[in-house]
C-alpha cells in the first residue's frame, strides 16, 4: 500500500516544467530531498504529479535522491480543497477517493495540510446489524471509530441490516417475544419482552439469540414454541470480504473469525476500533 504515514512525509513543490515522465526523471537527477520526505507532489500550471522518493542512507537533513517512482501523472490525479478534511484520517480520505475511481486524489485539507490517496487503496468493511432501533447501533459505533481516527486503514463501510419486523412477519404463533424493547418494532400480534419476564399465555415465538433462548429456558422452565435467531454473527452474509458484527457470546474485547470481527452486543467505540484494526492487520 503506497500511502503516506503522515502529511509531514509529503513535500509539495511548484516546478517550471511540464509534468511528463521524462521531464520528472530528468529533473530529479542530482537533486536532494529532505530527510523526512517520502513523496513529492509536483505542481505545474494547475496540474499535479505524485512521486515516491528513495534517498541515500545517511543522517544529513537533505540527502541525495537515489531513485524515484512516478505514482501518478496529471491525467491520473484529482485535486480537492476541503478545509474540513483531516488528511491524516485515512477513512475520511478513502471515502473521498471512492468518488474518483481510477484516480489519485490530492487533498488540501484542515490547517492547509496536504496528502493523497489512490482510489484503489480504499478497503471495504461490511457492517452487519439488526434494526430497529434506527440507525443500527454498530454502524454508529463504527462511524465514530472512523471519524475519531482510531482506525489505521483506509476503510469504507457498507451497511447491511436485517429488520426485526421482517422476522416477525414469519411468526406463526399468536404471541411473539423479543429480548427487550426497541423503538420501531411493530406487530399485529401480542408482543412480549423477555427482560420484563411477562406471564406467558399460549404459544410464544422467541426472536432472539442463543443467550435469550437460555434465559427463556431458565425463567419459564421450558423452551419457546418456536425460535428465530436474530444473531448478527449467524445471519451475516457469507463469502469474501471483511465484516464486523455483534454477538452476545463475546463478553468484552473482540474476536476474529477469518474475515469476520465480532464485538460484544454492548461494545464500546474503543472495542470496535480495536476489532477493525485487528481484522485488517
Image (spheres, helix red, strand yellow):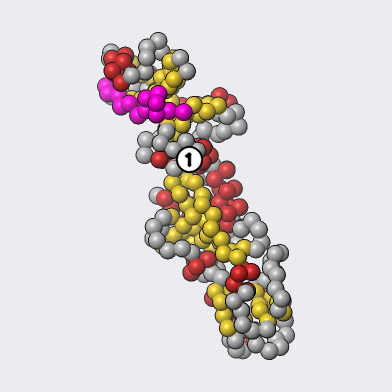
Disc 1 marks which residue?
A: 98
Residue at (42% x, 33% y) in the render:
103
Please tell me whether residue 49 is drawn above or below residue 27 in the rendered image. Answer: below
Q: Which of the image's four quarters has the N terminus? A: top left
Mark 1, secondary structure of its residue? loop
Residue at (46% x, 63% y) in the render:
237
Does residue 84 appear to the left or right of 237 in the view shown?
right
Residue at (43% x, 28% y) in the render:
77
x and y, in percent, of residue 263 in the image = 52, 60
Does residue 78 appear to the left or right of 214 in the view shown?
left
Q: Is residue 73 in the magenta section? A: yes
The picture quadrant where one finds residue 104 is top left
What secondary structure characterizes most of the magenta part?
Answer: strand
Please tell me whether residue 120 is drawn above or below residue 213 in the rendered image. Answer: above
Residue at (70% x, 70% y) in the render:
186
x and y, in percent, of residue 42 in the image = 41, 19
Q: Is residue 62 in the magenta section? A: yes
The picture quadrant where one finds residue 164 is bottom right
Q: Closest to the observer: 125 or 164?
A: 164
Does residue 113 appear to the left or right of 184 in the view shown?
left
Please tell me whether residue 33 is drawn above or below residue 278 in the rendered image. Answer: above
Category of crowding for the residue at label 1, using alpha-carbon neighbours closer than 10 angstroms: few (below 14), some (14–19), many (at least 20): some
Q: Closest to the observer: 252 or 207?
A: 207
Q: Closest to the observer: 252 or 96?
A: 96
x and y, in percent, of residue 15 in the image = 41, 13
Residue 255 in view in this figure = no
Magenta range is: 60-78
Residue 266 in view in this figure = yes
Amino acid at each position: 500500500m503506497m500511502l503516506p504515514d503522515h502529511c509531514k512525509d509529503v513535500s509539495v513543490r511548484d516546478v517550471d516544467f511540464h509534468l511528463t515522465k521524462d521531464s520528472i526523471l530528468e529533473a530529479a537527477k542530482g537533486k536532494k530531498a529532505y530527510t523526512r520526505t517520502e513523496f513529492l507532489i509536483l505542481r505545474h500550471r494547475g496540474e499535479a504529479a505524485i512521486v515516491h522518493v528513495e534517498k541515500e542512507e545517511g543522517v544529513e537533513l537533505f540527502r541525495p535522491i537515489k531513485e524515484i517512482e512516478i505514482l501518478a501523472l496529471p491525467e491520473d490525479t484529482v485535486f480537492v480543497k476541503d478545509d474540513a478534511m483531516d488528511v491524516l484520517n485515512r477513512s475520511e480520505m478513502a471515502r473521498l477517493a471512492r468518488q474518483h475511481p481510477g484516480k489519485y486524489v490530492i487533498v488540501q485539507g484542515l490547517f492547509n495540510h496536504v496528502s493523497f490517496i489512490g482510489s484503489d487503496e480504499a478497503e471495504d468493511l461490511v457492517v452487519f446489524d439488526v434494526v430497529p432501533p434506527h440507525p443500527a447501533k454498530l454502524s454508529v459505533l463504527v462511524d465514530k471509530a472512523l471519524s475519531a481516527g482510531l482506525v489505521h486503514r483506509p476503510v469504507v463501510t457498507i451497511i447491511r441490516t436485517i429488520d426485526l419486523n421482517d422476522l416477525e412477519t414469519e411468526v406463526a404463533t399468536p404471541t411473539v417475544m423479543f429480548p427487550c424493547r426497541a423503538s420501531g418494532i411493530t406487530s399485529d400480534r401480542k408482543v412480549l419482552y423477555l427482560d420484563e419476564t411477562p406471564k406467558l399465555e399460549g404459544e410464544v415465538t422467541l426472536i432472539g439469540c442463543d443467550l435469550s433462548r437460555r434465559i427463556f429456558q431458565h425463567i419459564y422452565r421450558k423452551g419457546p414454541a418456536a425460535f428465530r435467531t436474530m444473531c448478527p454473527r449467524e445471519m451475516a452474509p457469507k463469502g469474501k470480504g471483511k465484516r464486523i458484527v455483534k454477538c452476545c457470546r463475546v463478553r468484552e474485547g473482540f474476536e476474529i473469525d477469518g474475515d469476520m470481527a465480532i464485538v460484544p452486543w454492548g461494545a464500546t467505540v474503543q472495542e470496535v476500533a480495536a476489532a477493525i484494526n485487528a481484522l485488517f492487520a
